[in-house]
Image: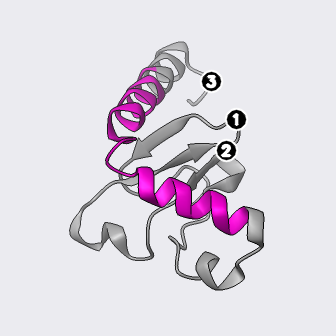
Amino acid sequence: MISDPAVRRLGQEIQEHEFHLGTLMSEMYQAEAERWEQALREGDTDLFGQICSGKHGAHGRACLLDREHDADGSPHWGKTADGRPITWLGSAPDDD
């Protein structure tokens, strides 16, 4: 079923919307992105413990927001492995 062309097209369309919304929300989450980049440079493991615990890395995306931010229905927002901003609702495909 996943290999069905219609399903693959829909998956691609959803991802395009996720990238578009991620770009639109980038300014709103600029502070979180800068905090993440600083933590990476400094190896700040305490900060990493405060960031969204969803495991999105295998799907090529990392949520940069605070832990439990999505409890009220807020989207995940972060960056892909190649640095593109992206946003999504619910779990990433590799969370399931």
Write the residue at 33% across / 41% down.
25
Q: Assess whether mark 3 and mark 1 are in contact (beta carbons under 8 angstroms).
A: no
Disc 1 and disc 3: Cα gap in Å? Answer: 25 Å
Where in the figure is residue 78, as x and y percent of width and height?
Answer: 51, 50
Q: Which mark is residue 82?
A: 1
Q: Earlier in the sequence, mark 3 or mark 2?
A: 3
Vertical placement of 64 versus 42: above or below? Answer: above
Q: Nearer the viewer, residue 50 or 2?
A: 50
Q: Quadrant of residue 16?
A: top left
Write the residue at 70% across / 42% down.
81
Amino acid on which the number 2 mark rests in the picture: Gly
Write the residue at 58% across / 30% down.
2
Q: Earlier in the sequence, mark 1 or mark 3?
A: 3
On the image, numbered disc 3 is attached to which residue? 3
**Front of the two marks 3 and 2:** 2
Amino acid on which the number 3 mark rests in the picture: Ser
Tag 1, which secondary structure? loop
Count of marks overlaid on the render: 3
Q: Which residues are magenta?
A: 13-40
Magenta span: chief secondary structure: helix
Q: Is residue 31 magenta?
A: yes
Where in the figure is residue 5, as x and y percent of width and height?
Answer: 54, 14
On the image, numbered disc 2 is attached to which residue? 60
Disc 3 and disc 2: Cα gap in Å? Answer: 20 Å
Figure quadrant of the C terminus: bottom right
Vertical placement of 63 versus 15: above or below? Answer: below
Q: Is residue 29 magenta?
A: yes
Write the residue at 47% across / 39% down.
86
Amino acid on which the number 1 mark rests in the picture: Asp
Q: Assess whether mark 1 and mark 2 are in contact (beta carbons under 8 angstroms).
A: yes
Tag 2, which secondary structure? loop
